[in-house]
Amino acid sequence: MIKRTGIVLLAVIVIALISGCTANMSDEQIAEQMKTKQDSIKDYSATMVISSSFGGKDEMSKAKIMNKMPGKSRFEYLEPAEMAGQVMVSDGKTIWSYDPKKMR
């Protein structure tokens, strides 16, 4: 989940970085420029709002995601209250999770 979210976020960042610079570029040039920009990203962070609907039930959560290349990430739920404080951390090989409510 963290990896997929990171990849989507990274793609959005890369596209934002090169938007407006594509007027006279071929598809191959755009792809190469995206890859170059992607390879130069060392870290990023974002606050995400996640909306989901399953079985007629709508849910929304808010989380902060931080990534440091290559492969290190941290994901922390901010909302809803019942999930706030839950953290998942990965070094690219292992994922650790922490739920403060289970520690009480």
Image (tube, rainbow, N blue to C red):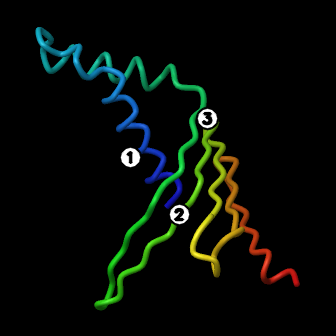
> What secondary structure is marked by label 2?
strand
Asked if residue 58 is positioned above or below residue 60 in the image, the reply reads: below
Amino acid on which the number 1 mark rests in the picture: Val
Residue at 80% x, 83% y is 102
Question: Disc 2 or disc 3, which is closer to the eye?
Answer: 2
**Are dots 2 and 3 in contact, CB under 8 Å?**
no
Q: Residue tagged by mark 3? A: 70
Q: Residue tagged by mark 1? A: 8
Res. 23 image quadrant? top left
Residue 36 in the image, given as x and y percentages of width and height: 40, 17
Question: Disc 1 or disc 3, which is closer to the eye?
Answer: 1
Residue 15 in the image, given as x and y percentages of width and height: 31, 30
Kindly report the distance in space between the C-alpha atoms of the residues bearing marks 2 and 3. Answer: 24 Å
The disc, 2 or 3, on the residue closer to the chain's N-terminal end is 2
Kindly report the distance in space between the C-alpha atoms of the residues bearing marks 1 and 3. Answer: 16 Å
Kindly report the distance in space between the C-alpha atoms of the residues bearing marks 1 and 2. Answer: 16 Å
Q: Residue tagged by mark 2? A: 62
